[in-house]
Image (cartoon, rainbow, N blue to C red):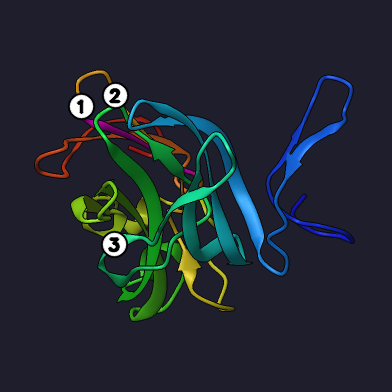
Amino acid sequence: PISGPGHRGPLLVDDLGHVIWSHNTRPVTAMNFRAAVYKGKPVLTWWEGKTTRGLGDGTHVIVDASYREILRLPTGNGRPADLHEFILTDRGTALVTSWERATRDLSAVGGPSSGLVIGGIVQELELPSGRVLFEWRSRDHVTIDESHQKYSPQGAYDYCHVNSVELDHDGNYLVSARNTWAVYKIDRHTGNVLWRLGGKK
């Protein structure tokens, strides 16, 4: 549950809908609740924090099989921890998303030549330290004119909006972006886009 009356936060139920376990995060919201493996043991993970206009600012949580918190992790480099992804990898790292505001030429989408844009960010973090091993910023690799999002003078232009990230079988990244209607395969060493699925390009 992410809104309305009562508790918010992670909730486990059995096949009949009976509550097995719940964790109240009110007044903040929890998202991306899933089972995972950390250091060879089963864990539960989620993001919790505040959301505004589909963007989050919060933290990532891992609890053990007894529901005890064993790690609370921010996004690296002081960036806001976005709600869209928190996934543990089999190489002892976490994939997370973030976002940033920057000034860009928005004339290609009907905006000003110097307008505020929101770019998507993907990070791979070392666990448990949280050290940034890799960071990819959409505005360095995906142009404004790739967006399908309609420009509005109200607020910053969210041209990309990263929704999910996954490791491919070769160790590179697959990044899905809502507002460009595309999936990007990202080189783990250079950050370059190896190919696009969908989108304008």
**Front disc: 1 or 3:** 3
* Residue type at tag 3: Gly
Query: Could you tell me residue 165's position as x and y percent?
Result: 39, 38
Reading the image, the residue beneath label 3 is 76
Query: Could you tell me residue 12's position as x and y percent?
Result: 73, 35
Reading the image, the residue beneath label 2 is 168
Query: Could you tell me residue 191's position as x and y percent?
Result: 16, 44
Q: Quadrant of residue 3?
A: bottom right
Kindly state the secondary structure of the residue where label 3 is placed: helix
Q: Quadrant of residue 74?
A: bottom left
Question: In the rendered structure, which disc, 2 or 3, sits on the residue that comes first in sequence?
Answer: 3
Pointer 2: residues within 10 angstroms few (<14), some, or many (20+)?
few
Measured in 3D between alpha carbons, the distance from the residue under mark 2 to the one under mark 3, in whole angstroms, is 22 Å
What span is in magenta? 171-177
Reading the image, the residue beneath label 1 is 171
* Residue type at tag 2: Asp
